[in-house]
Image (cartoon, rainbow, N blue to C red):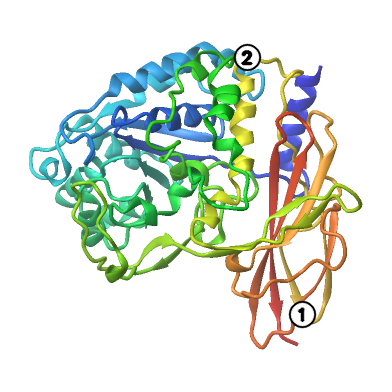
Amino acid sequence: MRTFLFSILLFLTVDFGYGQSLQKNRILVLTDIENEPDDTQSMVRLLLYANEIDITGIVATTSCWMPTAVHPQSIINIIQAYEKVQPNLKKHHPDFPEAKTLYPLVKSGLPKYGMKGVGEGMDSEGSDWIIKVLENNDARPLWIPIWGGANTLAQALYKIEKTKSKKEAKRLLAKLRVYTISDQDDSGIWIRNNFPELFYIVSPGDDYGNATWTAIMTNTIKGIDHTTISNRWLAHNIQQHHGPLGAVYPDVAWGMEGDTPSFLSLIPNGLNNAEHPEWGAWGGRYEFYKPDFSKMKDGSSIVTIAPETREIWTNAVDTYTPYIRNEFGRSVKQDTITFTDFKVTLWRWRDDFQYDFAARMDWCLMSYEEANHPPVPVLSHPENITVRSGEHFTLDAFQTYDPDGDNLSFLWFNYPEAGTYKKPIKVNGAENVYKAHFTAPNVEKEVTAHFILKVTDKGEPQLSRYKRVIVTIRPN
């Protein structure tokens, strides 16, 4: 009966009020799997979101760390583990695809490094598949998360340019969205230089310490709790007693899930908006500019860094003061520590997406009644509103509910960096109730301010979902 009620609630979420959008992002992954364990880790997580993301291809590629080999069989091995738990996953959401639809999506790029695998006669089933998916009659953008080298995509772009009309090539490229985990071969900078209009998110070069994505594994920041990325936490919540997918999730060798940020912002959670990297999301926040080459450093790989010739989506800085639990009185309070840097944009959400991952691991074996499911924030007003300078306004999520009937916690806060009004706008009164009151600042020109509602249940593990309200403030 509870599963039936959940299906009804899911239906209402699509069509009632201002609930969550269930639009799925298309994704085609390039992975240098077997270079190190983190690709396998990220692949396990990706498959657990196969109900939320439309997986259209998974291509085994090379990288600077594995320049002459590809391992498609390793992808198949993980899908085989997924196949064993997929029937149980469907008890929690009907859209988990059958494994038989995923196996044909596994392809191989050439076992060549970088630009040695780009040019005449360098087509592969992987590069051809990228073109085929792009040509499908589907208006949605195609996201290409690149976990290793980019040369399979580079070859697809090379062939498109050589074989398509300028009009058709422009149409196909306009559908592409690329997020690459730094530069792991020499084809990434070639792509950016030769296709200047291509949507491209990257922390350029191979100095990973200066990349936003590394915040997923950062454990040296003082003043925050790193428990949810510890080996002990992973063993208890992901690896052991969670079925075949947990069993194939390997121990951390160099870093935990370095590739996962490439698709975290594609998961529909009410905060994420993949078309707006500057708004901030689970995968971090990025701004569109040309990085200062003089500040770039060589890393430890064989990739040669070079100046960017155009603007790209890259590292952005947040100033963040966490909310922490308060033992008595109001249930939350702001911490006494404030952080300002580009990695903050990702790790500020880390506990949320780690708990979400753990819950989905539970779905592999647990019944619907035993497991936890995320709450559903529902606004009582549109997600975009307009006010005047000095005007008081209220944001309201009274109709929010939890499919498991769990008690819910609310938290409203302004995200200054996401809007054009950069000064913080504080809540008038309590920020932890279902509605929050604000006063629009006095402005001399029209600006936007982003307000985030975070709703967290008290299930095990606790799960969070969000609503983003964009407020346009006009001068009087």
- In the rendered structure, which amino acid carries the disc numbered 2? Leu
How many residues crowd mark 2 within 10 Å: few (<14), some (14–19), many (20+)? Answer: many
User: What residue is shown with label 1?
Assistant: 388
Give percent across and percent down for residue 207. 31, 54
Secondary structure of the residue carrying numbered label 2? loop
Viewer-proximal residue among 72 and 386: 72
Secondary structure of the residue carrying numbered label 1? strand
Among numbered discs 1 and 2, the one appearing first in the sequence? 2
333 displayed left or right of 169: right
- In the rendered structure, which amino acid carries the disc numbered 1? Arg
User: What residue is shown with label 2?
Assistant: 365
Q: Give the residue displayed 51% in from the left and 53% down from the top.
A: 284
72 displayed left or right of 87: left
39 displayed left or right of 427: left
Does residue 324 show up?
yes
The tag on residue 429 is none
Give percent across and percent down for residue 259. 41, 40
Q: Give the residue displayed 56% in from the left and 17% down from the top.
A: 240
Q: Quadrant of residue 109?
A: top left
Give percent across and percent down for residue 458. 79, 35
Q: Residue furthest left?
A: 120
Q: Disc 1 versus disc 2: distance between alpha carbons?
A: 52 Å
Give percent across and percent down for residue 209. 38, 53
356 displayed left or right of 158: right
| Quadrant of the frame with the N terminus | top right
How many residues crowd mark 1 within 10 Å: few (<14), some (14–19), many (20+)? Answer: some
